[in-house]
Image: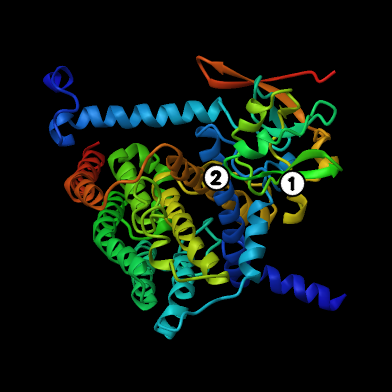
């Protein structure tokens, strides 16, 4: 038994050759006691998502919003869009404006990158719900408005913790 | 008012009370719901999750199992065209009923038992061996490859754990010199609890019961991630709920036997005399037996959070290569204890 602990641990394929009966009993006791410890002092890393939401990082590629005053109607965004989600249309005579179809959008952010006047920008929201598929095709009015945060949501900041793994620190919204 | 009194008399009539209310059907149903809920909560706590929480978060998701039960009860029972209908329908129902049958002879107090017999340990041990056969029947009748694989695995395991359980029960009845639960409990009250007299038998019985009622790490016959639900893959609706409850009902019955043979039966609360017949003969001893059985069951479901699943050959190797020998050793230990008691 002494030589099993000193010898190769995992090169032996067979468990019987790798560890004796006492070692196995020790392993079982170790696993069960760790389970009991976790039962007594739980370390949960579940984020209760719809009720708590993490603060998203800077430059998060969420939903896209158009600033209509800046837009010059160059239609570069519609050309670069790899999913053909962005389309140009005539908002007024000689005034092209983009609209987006979230059924197609893949949130690559090329349109935001390519915009020469920074009229398009991301907002840190990615989880809007639509009642039907027609609502996913935005018109100019919805496209220029930032989506609202739902109420009764606790904002938390995700912190990587060395002991626990992940920790959620509440953020005061005020 | 006469009708109400008649009804109360009927409900408190001992055979009916025993079969239907405690420790019969209703108690076992409540026990199962509590146990499945606590199994999920324990596994959640240990595995850094919450477990069921969506229904009534303040009660920690306790009504979840109620919701599940209602869903099972209202769902359509689909009987596929290719199954063998009669055994398909009979197997889970008969398995559930027969799984509860050993309660006929397991006493919950010196006076609270429906059938008084000299061979109650023998009858209980014999009746616990039948439900796995019906499980195999269900898999065979389902005409489905997953069901068949589950049945084959169960039939491999059954030979392993039944022999171990029967040997351990034999060793304990050898130790107490009786085949009657009442006398076994009396012997424990006179001397010591069986778990102290013969710890090897106790731990062997514990592991064999985990193997028999498909608890982790021996959840091989109904391995969800490999073979959908084992022998009960084709079942739906209330039949599936029943099939899911079979292993828990069997675990309850096995743990009642464990409490009676190893943990002194109604030992701590059963000795109290208050003068009230119902309190003295049913509630206090029954509660002590039931609470011990629930604690043992919670220990058994706790292993789900810790272990993975053994492969069938590993389980069989452990069963025949180690626990079978331990069962034989426990018989030797019983003989030694009996000899020592003779000497001193």
Left or right side of B316 for A155: right
Left or right side of B157 for B61: right
Image spot of residue B295 (x, y percent): 51, 43
Q: CA distance from mark 2 to mark 1?
A: 31 Å
Image spot of residue B304 (x, y percent): 44, 43
Kindly tell me whether residue A63 is visible in this rendering. Answer: yes
Kindly tell me whether residue A48 is visible in this rendering. Answer: no
Question: Where does label 1 land, which residue?
Answer: A129
- Identify the image quadrant of residue B221: bottom left
Label 1 marks which chain's residue? A
Q: Residue at x 38, y 62 (%)?
A: B230
Observer-nearest of B269 and B132: B132
Q: Residue at x 43, y 67 (%)?
A: B232
Image spot of residue B146 (x, y percent): 35, 65
Q: Residue at x 40, y 83 (%)?
A: B82
Q: Residue at x 55, y 34 (%)?
A: B45
Question: Where does label 2 land, which residue?
Answer: B40
**Quarter of the image with the N terminus of chain B in it:** bottom right
Image spot of residue B261 (x, y percent): 39, 50
SS of the residue under disc 2: helix
- Identify the image quadrant of residue B329: top left
């Amino acid at each position: 038994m002494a030589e099993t602990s000193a010898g190769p641990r995992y090169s032996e394929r067979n468990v019987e050759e790798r560890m004796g009966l006492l070692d196995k009993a020790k392993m079982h006791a170790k696993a069960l006691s760790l389970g009991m410890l976790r039962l007594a002092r739980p370390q949960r890393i579940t984020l209760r998502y719809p009720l708590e939401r993490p603060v998203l990082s800077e430059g998060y590629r969420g939903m896209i919003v158009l600033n209509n005053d800046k837009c010059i109607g160059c239609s570069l965004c519609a050309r670069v869009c790899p999913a053909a989600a962005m389309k140009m249309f005539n908002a007024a005579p000689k005034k092209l404006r983009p609209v987006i179809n979230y059924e197609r959008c893949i949130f690559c952010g090329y349109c935001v990158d390519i915009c020469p006047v920074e009229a398009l920008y991301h907002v840190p929201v990615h989880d809007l719900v639509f009642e039907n598929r027609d609502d996913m095709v935005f018109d100019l009015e919805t496209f220029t408005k930032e989506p609202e945060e739902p109420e009764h949501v606790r904002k938390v900041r995700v912190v990587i913790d060395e002991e626990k793994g992940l920790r959620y620190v509440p953020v005061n919204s005020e | 008012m006469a009708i109400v009194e008649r009804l109360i008399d009927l409900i408190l009539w001992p055979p009916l009370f025993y079969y239907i209310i405690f420790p019969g059907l209703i108690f076992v149903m409540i026990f199962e719901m509590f146990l499945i809920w606590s199994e999920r909560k324990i596994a959640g706590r240990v595995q850094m999750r919450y477990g069921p929480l969506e229904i009534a978060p303040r009660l920690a998701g306790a009504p979840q199992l109620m919701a599940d039960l209602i869903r099972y009860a209202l769902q359509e029972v689909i009987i596929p065209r290719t199954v063998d209908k009669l055994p398909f329908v009979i197997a889970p129902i008969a398995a559930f009923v027969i799984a509860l049958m050993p309660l006929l002879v397991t006493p919950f107090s010196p006076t609270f038992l429906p059938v008084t017999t000299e061979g109650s340990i023998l009858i209980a041990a014999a009746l616990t061996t039948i439900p796995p056969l019906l499980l195999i029947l269900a898999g065979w009748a389902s005409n489905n490859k997953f069901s068949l694989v589950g049945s084959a695995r169960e039939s491999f395991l059954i030979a392993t754990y039944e022999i171990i359980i029967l040997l351990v029960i034999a060793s304990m009845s050898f130790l107490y010199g009786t085949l009657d639960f009442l006398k076994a409990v009396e012997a424990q009250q006179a001397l010591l609890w069986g778990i102290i007299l013969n710890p090897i038998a106790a731990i062997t019985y514990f592991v064999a019961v985990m193997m028999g009622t498909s608890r982790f790490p021996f959840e091989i016959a109904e391995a969800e991630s490999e073979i959908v639900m084992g022998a009960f893959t084709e079942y739906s609706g209330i039949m599936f709920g029943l099939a899911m409850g079979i292993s828990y009902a069997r675990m309850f019955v096995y743990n009642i036997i464990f409490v009676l043979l190893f943990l002194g039966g109604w030992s701590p609360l059963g000795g109290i005399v208050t003068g009230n017949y119902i309190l003295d003969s049913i509630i206090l001893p029954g509660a002590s037996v039931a609470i011990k059985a629930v604690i043992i069951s919670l220990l058994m479901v706790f292993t789900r959070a810790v272990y993975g699943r053994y492969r069938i050959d590993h389980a069989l190797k452990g069963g025949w290569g180690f626990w079978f020998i331990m069962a034989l050793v426990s018989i030797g230990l019983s003989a030694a204890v009996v000899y020592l008691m003779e000497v001193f």
